[in-house]
Image (cartoon, grey):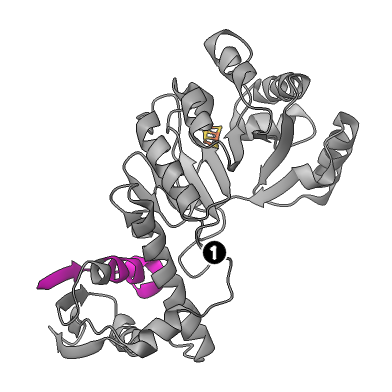
Amino acid sequence: MVRLVDGGDMDCGSGLLLLITRAMRRLEPDDLLGIRSAERSVATDLPVWADLVGHEVVGTHVEGAGGPWWFAVRKVVGAAQDTMFSLGDRTPVGQRLWAYTNFDCNLACGYCCARSSPKALARRLPAEVARTAFAQFRDLGGRELFLTGGEPFMHPELGEIVAAGKGLERTILTNAMVFSRGQRREVLQDMDRSVVLQVSLDSATADLHDAQRGRGSWAKAMTGIGEARGLGFRVRVAATLFDEDPDGVRALHARLDQEGISMPDRLIRPVALEGFAETGIHVSLDTLEPEPTITADGAWWHPVSVTNPNMRIADDPLPLAEVFGVVTDTVAVQDAAIRSGREVFRCA
Ligand code: SF4
């Protein structure tokens, strides 16, 4: 069998490694993978990758002085490769799973990595898919489940989805603005109190939070935090900041002291240059530790990268073993590159 991967102008770190890893997993031993790339660095990096994983480059071709470059790689499954894949000292893949319950949201924050807004397509994760995915996750030894969006409480089946994760350490990321009344309030009230709510709160007072997330959102988030805690939920607070202004951070901590939110339940994170964000930290396979993430229509390397086609792991959230397999294979190559000191290899 011959399969072709067109890498466009991607280099390994920007997504080509994921594409070829996904394709290789679908091939039998001795099958050929054709790889095309217009990115100059791939002329050096691709043979290094093949050497690291033990596959054989059986042909190369360059169309002109400036590329694109073509490679034919024969899949070899051997002892060296098996040994290499069993090594590695990074966080074990498979302990943590992220699931986007939906992509619509009552807010449209300027830095939203998911491009969520009231106008976004909901792309709801069906409860049935969640049940299957979480059962597979438990069978694979998974422990931590994070449900995010969009605003998860806008998913009409959120209660069923959360219940499907029973037995896992469950956290829901929410803006805490939409569960004050009605059916969403009932969903929250009926929820297992072992579920943690992680609420976005960017500043001690409304000014910065509202500038980033919309007028009136700070006050509603504070109300939501109080309601959730009043119902007996553990609430973790997460602030998203473009720049760590020390005074602002100190003020936020003082406010959270007043509210009785303990230090382990506070998280300050930078803005990633993904989704709606126009500035922020550039992320890639090289800079993001993998945190496999499923959506209704695929799987991704990390929850901040779900609008980045180069960070897509699979076209379907199931089976989860395949999602984790792609990540594990990719991490193994990255670790092998680091161990062998092959710094030229940009995937590491
Ligand atoms: S950052 Fe969160 S609250 Fe803001 S639009 Fe995105 S999903 Fe909604």
Q: Nearer the viewer, residue 185 or 85?
A: 85
The vertical placement of 56 against 29, above or below, is below
Position of residue 322 in the picture relative to residue 76 (left or right): right
Q: Position of residue 31 (x, y in %)?
A: 14, 78
Q: Position of residue 199 (x, y in %)?
A: 66, 33
Q: Quadrant of the N terminus?
A: bottom left
Image quadrant assignment for residue 209 = top right
All told, the count of numbered labels is: 1
**Residue at (21% x, 89% y) in the render:** 57
Position of residue 102 in the picture relative to residue 10 (left or right): right
Image quadrant assignment for residue 289 = bottom right
The answer to whether residue 13 is magenta is yes
**Residue at (35% x, 38% y) in the render:** 296
**Residue at (39% x, 25% y) in the render:** 119
The secondary structure type at the circle numbered 1 is loop
Q: Position of residue 48 (x, y in %)?
A: 35, 88
Q: Which residues are magenta?
A: 1-22
Crowd around label 1: few <14 · some 14–19 · many ≥20 (10 Å): some
Residue farthest to the left, as pictured: 1
Position of residue 315 in the picture relative to residue 197 (left or right): left
Residue receiving disc 1: 289
Image quadrant assignment for residue 190 = top right
Where on the image, by quarter, is ligand 1?
top right
